[in-house]
Image (cartoon, rainbow, N blue to C red):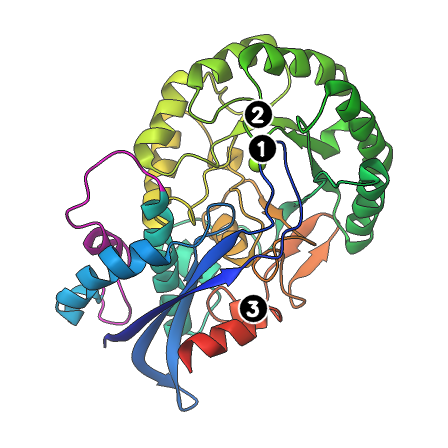
């Protein structure tokens, strides 16, 4: 058994939306394919992965550094010990040959796209959905086939922003979502408060609304926002300040009784450990959002889960960033608290396939093998183009 070819392509994200910091108009993602020498119905079995959302495609790093390293090694080095699949951790390790530690940036997403494709491939070789493969591999207890999901959106639009927010959340509600996340910090506090209140009217209570500042605030601004939203008892206040300013996070948490969520811009075990050590995160309360697709893949993410548990946190406190099929399988397969969804934005990657079932705020993947990306209508033609 071997991987006979690895391909990558940059795809455009459909994202004419803004948060407090950036506009997603020109964002891209790397889609990768691991083509195996195994066949099903006369076609090669192929694993697909991508580097989540929000950090651009990494074709340069893949082509110039990582793929040449993988081409140099004997193919059997990527086969797992059972001989029935591939070893995603070994693949990630080879991809990182001669890379210095620390400074985890774009390469963490490049490696992740490949590592995730290896999980998709393994699940397809076994003919099962990826969450089952992950549960077995990491010895995670069975816990049903559905998981809580929240609809992330509430971006800023140049015109009629609050009205569009209202309409957007109502559409999500009709689809079956019960929890929502909206952006804050894109303008003045006096503009955000009516947005939050509009969202509360639709959701029914604060526990169903989270707000995300995308790292926008300095300490004093973050404290001001926290004081202003505290009475609403929101589900969480996300990324109040710079994602690497653990002191800001700690000080904010000391003065804010609600939950804080952060971690989507931490790409390694060590960065995550620093958040656990210095960020003031509370056991059983605050939310960790590290995203395997931005941080070297599942192997590294599992190390982070182990570290969290050693620190006394629970994996139910984890809601990975990135509302797409890959993270749905990871959240379900690794026993996390829940997952995100982008029902309307970031196509062709964002959101779930029509075959997923969403009932009263909980989502289940279909039983398609792997991550089921082939059932994502907008993505499937691009996958076919990459391998044909
Ligand atoms: Mg966020």
Residue 384 picture location, percent across and down:
48, 78
Ligand 1's image quarter is top right
- Earlier sequence position, callout 2 versus callout 3: 2
Q: Say if 35 sits above or below 106 in the image.
A: below
Looking at the image, residue 12 sits to the left or right of residue 93; the answer is right
- Quadrant showing the N terminus: bottom left
Instruction: Give yes or no for residue 92 being in the magenta stretch.
Output: yes
Reading the image, the residue beneath label 3 is: 379
Residue 185 picture location, percent across and down:
66, 26
Residue 269: in sight, yes or no?
yes
In the picture, residue 308 is in which quadrant?
A: top left
Residue 186 picture location, percent across and down:
67, 29
Tag of residue 216: 2
Residue in the picture at 42% in, 83% down: 388
Looking at the image, residue 128 sits to the left or right of residue 171; the answer is left
Q: Do the residues labelled 2 and 1 touch (CB within 8 Å)?
A: yes
Query: How would you rate the neighbour count of disc 2 (Cα within 10 Å): few for under 14, some for 14-19, many for 20 or more?
Result: many
How far separated are the C-alphas under marks 3 and 1? Answer: 27 Å
Query: How would you rate the neighbour count of disc 1 (Cα within 10 Å): few for under 14, some for 14-19, many for 20 or more?
Result: few
Residue 310: in sight, yes or no?
no
How far separated are the C-alphas under marks 2 and 3? Answer: 32 Å
Q: Say if 377 sits above or below 263 in the image.
A: below
User: Helix or strand or loop: what does disc 2 sit on?
Assistant: loop
Task: Give the residue furthest to the bottom.
Answer: 42
Looking at the rendering, the stretch of residues picked out in magenta corresponds to 80-105
Query: How would you rate the neighbour count of disc 3 (Cα within 10 Å): few for under 14, some for 14-19, many for 20 or more?
Result: some
Reading the image, the residue beneath label 1 is: 21
Q: Nearer the viewer, residue 379 or 276?
A: 379
């Amino acid at each position: 058994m071997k991987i006979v070819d690895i391909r990558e392509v940059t795809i455009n994200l459909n994202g004419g939306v803004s948060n407090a910091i950036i506009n997603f108009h020109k964002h891209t993602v790397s889609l990768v394919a691991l083509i195996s020498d195994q066949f099903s119905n006369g076609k090669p079995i192929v694993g697909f992965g991508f580097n989540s959302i929000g950090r651009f495609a990494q074709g340069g790093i893949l082509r110039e550094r990582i793929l040449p390293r993988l081409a140099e090694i004997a193919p059997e080095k990527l086969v797992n010990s059972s001989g029935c699949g591939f070893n995603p951790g070994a693949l990630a390790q080879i991809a990182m040959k001669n890379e210095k530690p620390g400074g985890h940036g774009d390469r963490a997403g490049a490696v992740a796209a490949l590592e995730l494709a290896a999980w998709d491939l393994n699940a397809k070789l076994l003919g099962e959905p990826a969450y089952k493969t992950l549960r077995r591999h990491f010895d995670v207890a069975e816990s049903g086939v559905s998981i809580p999901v929240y609809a992330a959106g509430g971006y800023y639009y140049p015109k009629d922003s609050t009205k569009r927010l209202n309409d957007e959340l109502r559409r999500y509600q009709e689809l079956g979502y019960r929890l929502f996340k909206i952006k804050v910090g894109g303008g003045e506090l006096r503009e955000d408060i009516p947005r939050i209140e509009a969202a509360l009217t639709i959701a029914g209570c604060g526990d169903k609304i989270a707000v995300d500042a995308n790292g926008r605030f300095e300490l004093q601004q973050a404290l001001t926002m926290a004081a202003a939203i505290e009475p609403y008892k929101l589900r969480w206040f996300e990324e109040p300040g710079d994602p690497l300013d653990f002191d800001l996070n700690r000080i904010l948490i000391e003065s804010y009784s609600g939950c804080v969520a952060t971690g989507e811009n931490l790409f390694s075990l060590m960065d995550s450990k620093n958040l656990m050590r210095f960020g003031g995160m509370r056991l059983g309360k605050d939310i960790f959002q590290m995203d395997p697709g931005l941080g070297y893949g599942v192997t590294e993410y599992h190390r982070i889960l182990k570290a969290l548990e050693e620190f006394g946190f629970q994996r139910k406190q984890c809601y990975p960033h990135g509302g797409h099929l890959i993270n749905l399988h990871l959240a379900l397969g690794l026993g996390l608290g829940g997952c995100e969804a982008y029902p309307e934005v970031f196509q062709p990657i964002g959101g779930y396939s029509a075959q997923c079932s969403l009932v009263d705020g909980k989502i289940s993947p279909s039983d398609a093998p792997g991550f089921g990306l082939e059932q994502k209508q907008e993505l499937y033609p691009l996958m076919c183009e990459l391998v044909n």
